[in-house]
Image: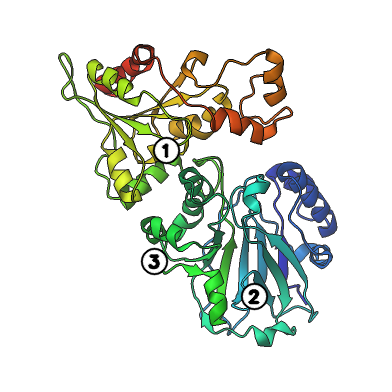
Amino acid sequence: MKTAIIFARSFSGNDQKRMGRGALVACCCVIAFTLCTLVYGPLPAASPAAVKLVQSIPAADLKILQSREEISQPNIWPGGLNDKLQPAIIRNLSSRRSQVYELNGDVRIHGRRPSTIFLFSGDMATTATAGWITTKPYARNPDPIAMRKVTGLKLIIHAQSGPDAAELRCSRNFSLPAIVFSSGGYAGNPFHDFSDVLIPLFLTAQQFNREVVFLVADRRPWWTNKYKLILEKLSAYDVVDMAAAAAAEEVMCFPRMIVGLRAHKELSLDPSEPPHYSARDLTDFLRSTYSLHRQELVVPPGPGGCTRRPRLLIVSRKKTRRLMNAGEVAEQARRLGFEAVVSEMEGRVSGVARLVNAFDVMVGVHGAGLTNMLFLPANAVVIQIVPIRVEILARHYFRGPAEDMGLRYMEYRVRPSESSLPAPSSEQSRSKLDGGDGAAGAGAGAGGWHGFRAIYLDAQDIRLDAARFRETVLSRALEHVCGGGG
């Protein structure tokens, strides 16, 4: 009898060619686990039974699925969800940033055990649990601090005739696929809201054309309400709170489930990776979601420059990395020809989105407020003010994403005379904190990341040389806008 459960790990194309399609399954498993460990780090926990199950599958019955392979459309059979059981397939779509598993078959969640997801198979020879995997559905896997705030889930491969089958009789049958994710971790910080949750959710869910159900672990009602428009744009159905479902003691059954969110990089997407969405697809989606009128920067140049005064937004910060002379910088911008406004990024997301979209240039000190460049029209200018020794963070979190979004990125690096930090008493004292190698944000040295953050991110304010800022950066931004964005 053919084995009904297929546990598929991820392989590169070259590795599959070397192994050959007729290779023994046991060898495939060893190589797969080795490769995943090298590329992604240690794998999530899996039971010995799960490993044994993979090794026992005949080569003819094994379907090897690549991590780069497209997610296929749901296979919904005519007889209804549980009238006929199809082979169960687990696909590992994990990357360095996130653990992601696609479950196809008879997938069930019991309200009494909301952190456990069962994948049943009716053709298993055994009546016991075949194996399990643990995972956390949040896209910041390398960060142990964030992951401690995320509920762990257990994925159990189970026999249809096992002891749990009667207890897990379906009370709610869904004909739609489901996506499970967490709004824990660093959610609540605008940068992490988008980079860790909303952008990975767009990447994972957009292909379903709203025909998908969201199951949220660690749900915070204020968070789902804050991003309600985005969630409704991605799914036509109410969000299911996994913790609240426990009170109802329902058994929810799905034909397909993706546990975790696919993620490529910080605040952006890689169109070369499945499902091949780009950062511009994302910003188009956000402009549509919030009904933003300006799709692209268009300021027709006139004989003496712009036909209207370009609009410049200076993002204000209250607590850390404050721009102490924002008013002076705004005045310099006005003298240059801008209509300049200083504003904090507060209030409803829809209001912030409309505010940002109305500007041609956005200026801000490195921090979460710059995340709102997502709402700028394409070809607009974003200017990041980079505090002392924050260069690597600035490049990683905002420069690359801005360029991916089709924005003109400019950077102003703060001089020691413009920073509130006292000059280091010696090069040796600097080395103790961050290694003295200029690797800002690397967390090297005795101080580590927490020491670096306490000084360079939390204790540093900025007072710009406004004239220098005008000549070196603002004039270039004006030239870009009034030159037609070329």
Task: Say which residue appears at 59% left-offset and 78% top-offset.
Answer: 111
Q: Mark 2 highlights which residue? A: 113
Q: Quadrant of residue 258?
A: bottom right
**Dot in front, 2 or 1:** 1
Left or right for 90, reference 212: right
Dot 3: element: loop
**Percent position of residue 410, x then y:** 42, 22
Q: Amino acid at mark 3?
A: Ala
Left or right for 394, reference 432: left
Q: Amino acid at mark 2?
A: Arg
User: In 3D space, how far apart are the residues under numbered discs 2 and 1 (Cα atoms)?
Assistant: 39 Å
* Looking at the image, residue 77 lies above or below residue 283: below
Q: Nearer the viewer, residue 297 or 198?
A: 198
Q: Quadrant of residue 273?
A: top right
Dot 1: element: helix
Q: Amino acid at mark 1?
A: Gly
Binning the other alpha carbons within 10 Å of mark 3 as few (below 14), some (14 to 19) or many (20 upward) gives some
Residue 142 seen in the figure: yes
Q: What colouring style does the render use?
A: rainbow
**Dot in front, 2 or 3:** 2
Q: Nearer the viewer, residue 150 or 59?
A: 150
Q: Nearer the viewer, residue 116 or 332?
A: 332
**Percent position of residue 114, x then y:** 61, 72
The numbered mark, 1 or 3, whose residue comes first in the sequence reads: 3
Q: Mark 1 highlights which residue? A: 369
Say whether marks 1 and 3 touch (CB < 8 Å).
no
Residue 436 seen in the figure: no
User: In 3D space, how far apart are the residues under numbered discs 2 and 3 (Cα atoms)?
Assistant: 26 Å
Say whether marks 2 and 1 touch (CB < 8 Å).
no
Q: Mark 3 highlights which residue? A: 236
